[in-house]
Image: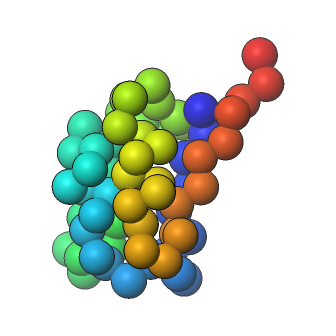
């Protein structure tokens, strides 16, 4: 899966890090960011939950072609 966070939209609510702490964290400014192991995508079952939890829709999860 591909994961992107639109940093221009993110407001730093932290819902992504709460919902999927194995994928997301917050940077020094409080904005959502991916943990290094998940920069190219991930298979965490909470990934889509975290994307839906974002109050401003800053997270996009896409399927990658095989």
Q: Residue at x 46, y 30 (%)?
A: 42
Q: Which residue does the image show at 42% across and 41% down from the upper left?
A: 47
Residue at position x 49%, y 77% in the image: 56
* Residue positioned most to the right: 65
Give above or below for 12 relative to 5.
below
Q: Where in the figure is residue 53, as x and y percent of width and height? A: 38, 61
Q: Is residue 21 left or right of residue 23?
A: left
**Could you say where residue 37 lies in the image, as x and y percent from the top left?**
36, 33
In the picture, which quadrant includes the N terminus? top right
Q: Is residue 65 left or right of residue 27?
A: right
Image label count = 0
Above or below for 16 versus 22? below
- Left or right: residue 12 compared with residue 47: left
- The extreme top residue here reads 66
Q: Quadrant of residue 66?
A: top right
Question: Would residue 37 be seen by someone viewing this image from the given angle?
Answer: yes
Front-most of residues 43 and 30: 43
In the image, is residue 64 above or below residue 49? Answer: above
User: Along the line of sight, which residue is nearer the eye, 18 or 37?
Assistant: 18
Residue drawn 38% across and 83% down? 11
Q: Position of residue 8 (x, y in %)?
A: 54, 82
Residue 12 location (% of width, % of height): 31, 78
**Residue 36 seen from this side:** no
* Protein image colouring: rainbow
């Amino acid at each position: 899966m591909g994961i992107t966070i639109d940093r221009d939209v993110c407001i730093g609510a932290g819902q992504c890090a709460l919902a999927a702490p194995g994928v997301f964290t917050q940077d020094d400014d409080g904005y959502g960011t991916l943990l290094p192991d998940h920069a190219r995508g991930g298979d965490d079952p909470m990934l889509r939950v975290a994307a839906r939890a974002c109050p401003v829709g800053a997270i996009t999860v896409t399927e990658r072609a095989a």
